[in-house]
Amino acid sequence: MRPACIVDPAVPKPNWHDAAQCMRNLRDVWAASAKDPTARQASADFARRYVEFAIMQPSQAAPRDGAAALLVERNQRGEAFNAMGQGGVAYFLLQFARLAQVGDTSAAANWYRELAVRAIEALLNPVESGGFVRRTPCGDKECAWFHSVTRRDWSGSEGGTLNQDLHAIRDLLLIANGRFALPPELEQRLDATVEAALRQLLAGTDPSTPTLDGYFPPGSRQSLAFYGARLGRQSAPAYYYLGRGTLDCHYHVHATELLFQIMTEAGKRPRLVALAQQGLACGSPLWRYDAAIRAVRATPARATCDSRDIARYRPPSPLPCGG
């Protein structure tokens, strides 16, 4: 197991993104122990202790209406700041609830489910109310962005890390398609927010909020998409690279893989089918992100990349225009 799976009050608790990775491991071990009652109970007990240690420890909230009641990881300012970790934790809490229903007490399943619902509600909450979502008009419709950044010293509202926004969208779609029997009103909010988030990526009109084209402008001389954007300090996003070795290439590949997953999952939701088709269309931002990886594969000197990132890249479905 990763170090993040340690339950020890003497060590710092993990950030929620690491906690979600640990919860993935715990889910797999718990599921694999189904035929051994002793091992199954041990897995269930450790999962409960881990969630209590990693997720439930209190943290000081920023003074915003309702923020103190939200189930979120907070930064140095007492703000929600990492939508990526939030979505991952919510998804695996629902997985734990499903596992608990199979052979454990209903109280355990209900406990996990209630935590998951609280985590999802916080993820869908606007920044102004202590959550993660920036909502802006897009013509006669709405767009949305999930604020997320790794740094704890920035304001959460400055977070514009591309792969982290995509993680949040992907995990919400996995939740929506996972048949977890969410409250109907929450599922409707989830669908509406994801729809607005996809619209922002593909066709956002607010000049201060990022888009896929903003990270990788059409016709630019960039070989790779920007890693992130700092928001709110000027009228337009301040896009940036990490500038550390091969990490920018790694995250370009990772963002492209997440986009494929997102469009695949969105295509399963009736209200999102049109946006999924737009996302996979010839000439779409995803098509250009994919083409950039293929260009690096054909001409390795084009960008600073780890050959392993390029070699393992396998888009799940063919794209038009020769993709």
Image: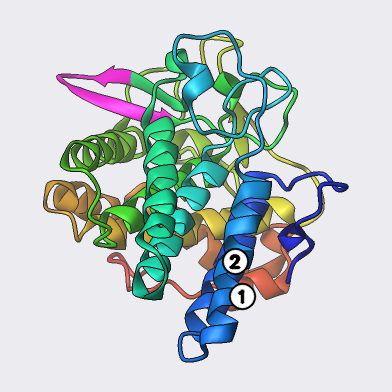
Q: Do callouts 1 and 2 mark residues in contact (Cβ within 8 Å)?
A: yes
- Residue 54 versus residue 274: which sits nearer the camera? 54
Q: From the viewer's perspective, is 50 left or right of 315? A: right
Look at mark 1 in the image and give the residue it sits on: 42
Query: Magenta residues: mostly which secondary structure?
Result: strand
Residue 88, above or below 202: below
Query: What type is the residue that disc 2 sits on?
Result: Asp
Res 20 quadrant in image: bottom right
Residue 41 spot, x, y in % from top left: 55, 76
Neighbour tally class for label 2: few under 14, some 14-19, many 20 plus, Cα within 10 Å: few
Query: Which quadrant does the C terminus fall into?
Result: bottom left
Span colored in magenta: 136-145
Identify which residue is drawn at 20% across, 55% down. Answer: 277
Look at mark 2 in the image and give the residue it sits on: 45
Distance between the Cα atoms at labels 1 and 2? 5 Å
Residue 298: in sight, yes or no? no
